[in-house]
């Protein structure tokens, strides 16, 4: 909902999540449905940022070729739009990908980095929930993440960014894409001095 060209972007996001679930069981274990929906929406928005300008341009050209008045063709609400989507899912899809190869590569890269980084986050949570996180924050080791705010910083270190996590019980944690063990060791050394 609210993602431009969701009929095309949604299946990409769904496929990325299926692959993530297949390779990282901690994803479903550590993130409840609402948190997973937050992560998927952030991914869909990222993909839309890459593809929507090209799709909007192609839809405008499609309308002109069909002889339709622009004000009668609102994405998602007309037969002409549905025809445009159907064409992109069919014979026009490969042509679009060649014409906008840069955007297609950026989307493929973003899907892959999202799967890798979200899987790493889930695995780190699974590992750290039994040691560092409960000790520092008092979060129950069985608590699941119930809300996520993604992309709170620029992407760096392989496409990762700061993420705010809210756990069951209301405790919050800002996840930076590095292991907590580093801070844990520093804290242990400082406390033992």
Image: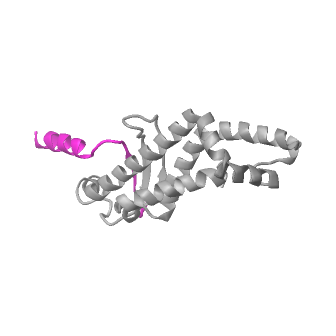
Rendered view: 102 above or below 146: above
- The residue positioned 59% from the left and 40% from the top of the image is 97
- The residue positioned 29% from the left and 63% from the top of the image is 141
Q: Is residue 141 magenta?
A: no
Residue 172: % across, % down: 41, 53
- The residue positioned 43% from the left and 57% from the top of the image is 19
Task: Classify residue 186 as left or right of residue 117.
Answer: left
Residue 161: % across, % down: 42, 40
Which quadrant is home to the N terminus?
A: bottom right
Task: Classify residue 27 as left or right of residue 133.
Answer: right
Q: Nearer the viewer, residue 146 or 11?
A: 11
Quadrant of the image occupied by residue 126? bottom left
Q: Nearer the viewer, residue 28 or 165?
A: 28
| Magenta region, residue range | 167-193
Residue 160: % across, % down: 40, 40
Q: Nearer the viewer, residue 8 or 183?
A: 8
Quadrant of the image occupied by residue 69? top right
Rendered view: 118 above or below 193: below
Residue 154 can be seen, yes or no: yes
Task: Classify residue 55 as left or right of residue 21.
Answer: right
Which quadrant is home to the C terminus?
A: top left
**Residue located farthest toward the left when viewing the structure as drawn:** 193
């Amino acid at each position: 909902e609210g993602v431009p060209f969701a009929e095309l972007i949604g299946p990409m996001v769904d496929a990325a999540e299926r692959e993530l679930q297949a390779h990282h069981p901690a994803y479903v274990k550590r993130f409840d449905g609402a948190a997973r929906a937050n992560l998927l929406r952030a991914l869909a928005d990222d993909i839309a940022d890459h593809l929507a300008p090209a799709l909007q341009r192609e839809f405008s050209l499609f309308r002109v070729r069909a002889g339709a008045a622009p004000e009668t063709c609102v994405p998602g609400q007309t037969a002409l739009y549905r025809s445009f989507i159907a064409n992109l899912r069919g014979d026009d899809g490969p042509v679009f990908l060649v014409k906008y190869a840069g955007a297609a590569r950026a989307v493929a890269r973003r899907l892959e980095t999202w799967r890798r980084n979200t899987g790493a986050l889930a695995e780190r949570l699974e590992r750290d929930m039994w040691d560092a996180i409960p000790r520092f924050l008092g979060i129950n080791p069985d608590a699941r993440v119930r809300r996520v705010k993604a992309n709170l910083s620029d992407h760096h270190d392989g496409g990762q960014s700061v993420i705010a996590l809210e756990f069951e019980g209301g405790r919050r944690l800002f996840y930076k894409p590095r292991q907590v063990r580093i801070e844990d060791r520093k804290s242990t050394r400082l406390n033992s001095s």
